Image (tube, rainbow, N blue to C red):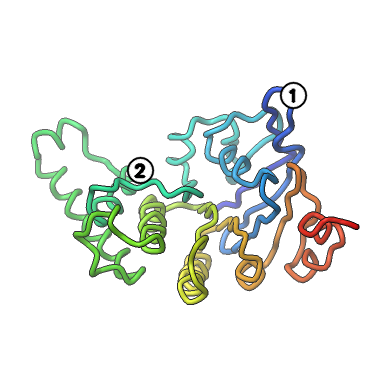
Amino acid sequence: MPSLVLDRVSKRFGGIDAVSNVSIEIPESCITGLIGPNGAGKTTVVNLITGMHNLTSGQILLGDIDIGRAPAHETARSGVSRTFQNIRLLAEASVLDNVVAGFHRLESSSLISGIFGFATSLRESRTFRERGRELLARFKMERFVDHPAGCLSYGHQRRVEMMRALAMEPKILLLDEPVAGMNDVEAYELGDIFCELALSGIGLLLIEHNIRFVTKLCEHVHVLDAGKIISSGSPAHVMHDPAVVAAYLGTA
């Protein structure tokens, strides 16, 4: 699977630089961390990668393909998937239906085929539902298959959103605060799944305020402050970087 590379990426809103000259790499088969204080620009970086914001300057490369100015649907079809900081589910639809919605990128049958219930469309639909159930089993959510997603606990809704993102069979998965609000047991259960995904070849970008969680899972961490990368390296390196300490704790 290809790496995702941000090369001197910038985004300006009016006269304000939300992201300035950011260069990071998200390699295949690795979990890469992106941390920083509130308002540092982390979610803006994700929105730039996924085509929800337009670049002011720079490049975003998925392998040899420049996706930096592609619309969001093309970026998704190229193999970039994400979760959101604020959960976005179809609250009244079942858990399984929410997960199956993620397979839209893989659909090959036509709209007409689906409307008239042709055999190819029905076969594809059955396949997606079977694969959706496999994801539910992977996340230990089988008992909630027919539950309305909006009735689940916060932590379980987070899992549904991640399963939907994985249903797209991404090459790169962007996780925007995936364990926010979870206890340590819930968080590290998901952490084990993230490690399995990396071993399968997917490149993961983990944005998270739980620093202990990030430093345990990530091989490489980038620290963003006021839209700029102020430190990059191993978890041990960035956690002892005076610039990082100052960004989080302030200076006297």
Position of 103 relative to 70 (above/below): below
Going from N to C along the chain, the mark reached first, 1 or 2, is 1
Quadrant for the C terminus in the image = bottom right
Q: Which residue is mark 2?
A: 105
Give the camera-side residue of 32 and 4: 32
Looking at the picture, how far across and down is residue 81, in whole percent?
47, 48
Q: Residue at x 54, y 52 (%)?
A: 176
Q: Amino acid at mark 2?
A: Arg
Q: Secondary structure at mark 1?
A: loop
Identify which residue is drawn at 56% across, 39% down: 47
Pair 1/2: label in front: 1
Q: Residue at x 21, y 55 (%)?
A: 127
Q: Measuring from the top left, give residue 227's x and y in whole percent.
A: 73, 42
**Quadrant housing residue 210:** bottom right
Is label 2 in a helix, a strand or a loop? Answer: helix
Q: Which residue matches tag 1? A: 15
In contact (CB < 8 Å): disc 1 and disc 2: no
User: Quick one: which residue is furthest to the right in this view?
Assistant: 252
Q: Is residue 151 left or right of residue 2?
A: left
Q: List the single residue furthest toward the front.
A: 252
